[in-house]
Image (cartoon, helix red, strand yellow):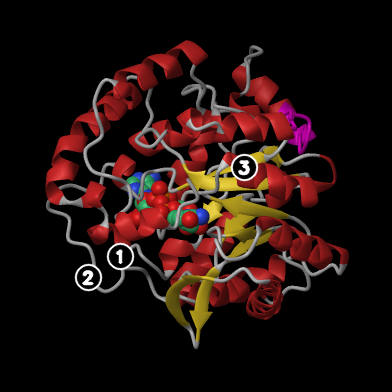
């Protein structure tokens, strides 16, 4: 799969680029917008904030399952769930609109986030843009009367019911991509894939993906109904998908990859430390071994390396974290979450930097010399992961 470098080239932006930059240079991550001559930085935003041509496009999946989306997406989860304190609904809606204005076309939510409240927020904020952006959502975790039961349920009737419920909450006629959030050991994956195939034929959904599943399941699922994307945790402090063959199988089968928690749930942004107080009622980080004070203190050594790499290149640690992911393959589309415009802009501005493969390799090699302290999940959450 090749990055769609030709998409969205604005003639006005191109001319301005040529004038300001003066000389030809390789455009970072397929970026094609206006350059600031003095800094070598690129402004991502066209003068009228026209979302239709503001960000480069990447393609997740291939063939009939192909999905063109902005090179960086937006994870909506933390606006209502698991990320402690969040702004009120009005401000969240405004920020989501600002993301649309800046050209983000991929927004990620799930039934379990809240539960339900996150889909409702995404529906209220984003349905008016349904013809130009995409909200992807996820089924699998059982939710009864608005509460999580902790069980998985991907039986055909449940998937159908959840699809109808998500369509209603998202206020759309067809879900651009419906992920299975976690593997359901009681429902054969072929049965899930076949239900999805029927839903695609009926126009209720357009594509599908899976989260945190193993190679065998991916092969079986893809054979019944081609997958557009695998969404699993991936960042500089968690590189399992490089080791367990997930990225390789995505490349082999032409499936896209969406790294979730790409800033390691905020840690790689450099604003969390051993003294951080998480909201005890609405933040799963306090339950994760990697976010215990001792682990955060030890892991600060990794953050320091990333910050140092960024300091010498004018990048923040979040930008280094996102840039490192994006250079892995043109079919990788991270979905960082934020509640702040300043962080949204910072994250999108990752697309303005370019480092050589050798620089990224030296960064990952240096980071790899330090063992990460603390597991990413507790035992219960790890049990739900399909490998
Ligand atoms: N499939 C799955 O199982 C699964 C699991 C988890 C998450 N997800 C998806 O992945 C998305 C993102 O994951 P996530 O929220 O866990 O992790 P993340 O994107 O790695 O981190 C989000 C956290 O980082 C902070 N942040 C964002 N930009 C920053 C910046 N430039 N500088 C400093 N801090 C920054 C945010 O705080 P501020 O609000 O202060 O910016 C927020 O608390 C979710 O919204 C969800 O859609 C999927």
Looking at the picture, does residue 60 appear above or below residue 166? above
| Corner quadrant of residue 307 | top left
Label 2 or label 3, whichever comes before in sequence order: 3
Q: Are marks 2 and 1 in contact (CB under 8 Å)?
A: yes
Mark 2 to mark 1 CA distance (whole Å):
6 Å
Between residues 354 and 334, which one lies in front from this camera angle?
334
- Please tell me how crowded label 2 is: few (under 14), some (14-19), or many (20+) other residues with Cα within 10 Å: few
Between residues 23 and 230, which one lies in front from this camera angle?
230
The span shown in magenta is 1-14
Label 3 or label 1, whichever comes before in sequence order: 3
Kind of element beneath mark 3 = helix
Between residues 375 and 123, which one lies in front from this camera angle?
375
Measuring 63% from the left and 58% from the top, which residue is drawn there? 179
- Please tell me how crowded label 1 is: few (under 14), some (14-19), or many (20+) other residues with Cα within 10 Å: some
Instruction: Please state if 205 lies on the left or on the right of 158 as rendered.
Output: right
Q: Are marks 3 and 1 in contact (CB under 8 Å)?
A: no
Q: Judge whether residue 274 is colored magenta.
A: no
| Corner quadrant of residue 130 | bottom right
Which mark lies nearer to you, 2 or 3?
3
| Corner quadrant of residue 199 | bottom right
Instruction: Please state if 61 lies on the left or on the right of 25 as rendered.
Output: right
Chief SS of the magenta region: loop
Kind of element beneath mark 1 = loop
Locate residue 216, reporting x and y percent.
Answer: 62, 42
Locate residue 92, reporting x and y percent.
Answer: 47, 68
The N terminus appears in which quarter of the rendering? Answer: top right
Q: Which residue is mark 3?
A: 216
Q: Which residue is mark 2?
A: 280
Whether residue 88 is visible, yes or no, is yes
Q: Which residue is mark 1?
A: 283
């Amino acid at each position: 799969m090749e990055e769609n470098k030709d998409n969205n080239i604005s003639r006005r932006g191109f001319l301005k680029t040529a004038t300001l930059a003066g000389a030809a240079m390789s455009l970072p991550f397929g970026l094609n917008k206006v350059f600031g001559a003095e800094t070598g930085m690129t402004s991502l935003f066209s003068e009228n904030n026209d979302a239709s041509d503001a960000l480069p496009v990447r393609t997740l999946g291939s063939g009939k399952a192909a999905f063109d989306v902005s090179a960086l997406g937006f994870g909506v989860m933390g606006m209502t769930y698991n990320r402690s304190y969040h702004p009120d609904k009005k401000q969240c809606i405004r920020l989501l609109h600002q993301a649309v204005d800046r050209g983000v076309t991929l927004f990620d939510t799930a039934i379990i986030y809240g539960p339900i409240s996150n889909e409702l927020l995404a529906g209220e904020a984003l349905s008016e843009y349904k013809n130009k952006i995409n909200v992807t959502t996820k089924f699998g975790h059982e939710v009864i009367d608005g509460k999580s039961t902790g069980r998985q349920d991907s039986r055909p009737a449940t998937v159908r019911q959840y699809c109808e419920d998500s369509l209603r909450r998202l206020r759309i006629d067809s879900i651009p991509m419906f992920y299975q959030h976690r593997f359901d050991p009681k429902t054969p994956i072929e049965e899930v894939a076949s239900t999805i195939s029927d839903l695609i034929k009926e126009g209720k959904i357009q594509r599908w993906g899976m989260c945190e599943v193993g190679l065998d399941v991916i092969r079986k699922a893809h054979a019944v109904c081609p997958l557009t994307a695998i969404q699993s945790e991936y960042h500089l402090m968690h590189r399992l998908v490089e080791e367990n063959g997930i990225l390789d199988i995505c490349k082999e089968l032409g499936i896209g990859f969406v790294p979730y928690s790409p800033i390691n749930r905020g840690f790689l942004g450099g604003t969390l430390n051993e003294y951080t107080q998480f909201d005890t009622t609405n933040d799963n980080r306090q339950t994760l071994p990697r976010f215990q004070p001792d682990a955060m203190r030890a892991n600060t050594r990794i953050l320091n390396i990333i910050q140092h790499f960024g300091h010498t290149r004018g990048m923040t640690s979040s930008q280094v974290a996102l840039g490192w992911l994006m250079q892995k393959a043109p079919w990788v589309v991270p979905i960082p979450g934020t509640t702040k415009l300043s962080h949204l802009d910072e994250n999108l501005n990752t697309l303005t930097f370019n480092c050589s493969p050798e620089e990224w390799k030296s960064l990952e090699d240096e980071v790899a010399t330090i063992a990460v302290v603390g597991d990413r999940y507790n035992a219960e959450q790890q049990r739900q992961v399909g490998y």
